[in-house]
Image (cartoon, grey):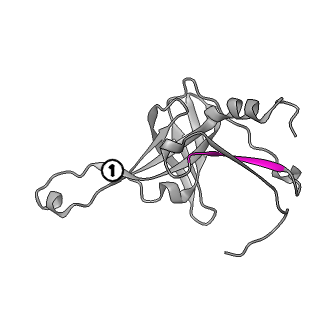
Amino acid sequence: KSNQYKSVHDMIKDVSPAIVGVINMQKSTNLDDLFNGKASKSKEAGIGSGVIYQISDGSAYIVTNNHVVDGASEIKVQLHNTKQVDAKLIGKDALTDIAILKIKDTKGIKSIQFANSSKVQTGDSVFAMGNPLGLEFANSVTSGIISANERTIDA
């Protein structure tokens, strides 16, 4: 439950500018180009979602999954207004599958505050926002419930 929003629609409308698309660009390895001394251009190798969690000193910081940016020679971020900007990888951890990106263009964007996960209870409603299966599905929303708390899954 939220005292801040009258409806789910209001919540989605408010937080959606913080949701971004993350584009993994990789250089192709074309043997003909290598033999002829041509530089290979980066091509889209994968797409995922991210969320802007902090804006400071003219930069925005984004959390995404490590598997989304793994192997990237270049990373682009598509903002809620469909504008694409270059991103810098700040850090990543394969074990927790987390990566942090930084972008310079902060005009018209906002960040979202992370919830306190210790307050989540079994049966609470949750919403997932992002762009599953590509940028053409940007701003998708789905819902579910917390099925259990404090579960450990061995990996």
Identify residue type, mark 1.
Answer: Lys
In depth, the one of 75 and 84 nearer the eye is 84
Query: In the rendered structure, which segment of residues is drawn in magenta?
Result: 125-131
Q: Report the quarter where the N terminus lies.
A: top right
Q: Viewed as shown, does residue 34 lie left or right of 142?
A: left
**Whole-percent x, y for residue 102 in the image:** 53, 40
Figure check: 22 above or below 94: above
Q: Viewed as shown, does residue 30 lie left or right of 81?
A: left
Figure check: 155 above or below 39: below
Say which residue appears at 52% left-offset and 34% top-offset: 79
User: Given the current orientation, which residue lies at the most extreme bottom position?
Assistant: 154
Figure check: 29 above or below 83: below
* Prevailing secondary structure of the magenta residues: strand
Q: Report the quarter where the C terminus lies.
A: bottom right
Indicate yes or no whether the magenta region holds residue 107.
no
**Whole-percent x, y for residue 6 in the image:** 83, 29
In depth, the one of 89 and 17 nearer the eye is 17
Figure check: 70 above or below 19: below
Indicate yes or no whether the magenta region holds residue 127.
yes
Say which residue appears at 21% left-offset and 60% top-offset: 30
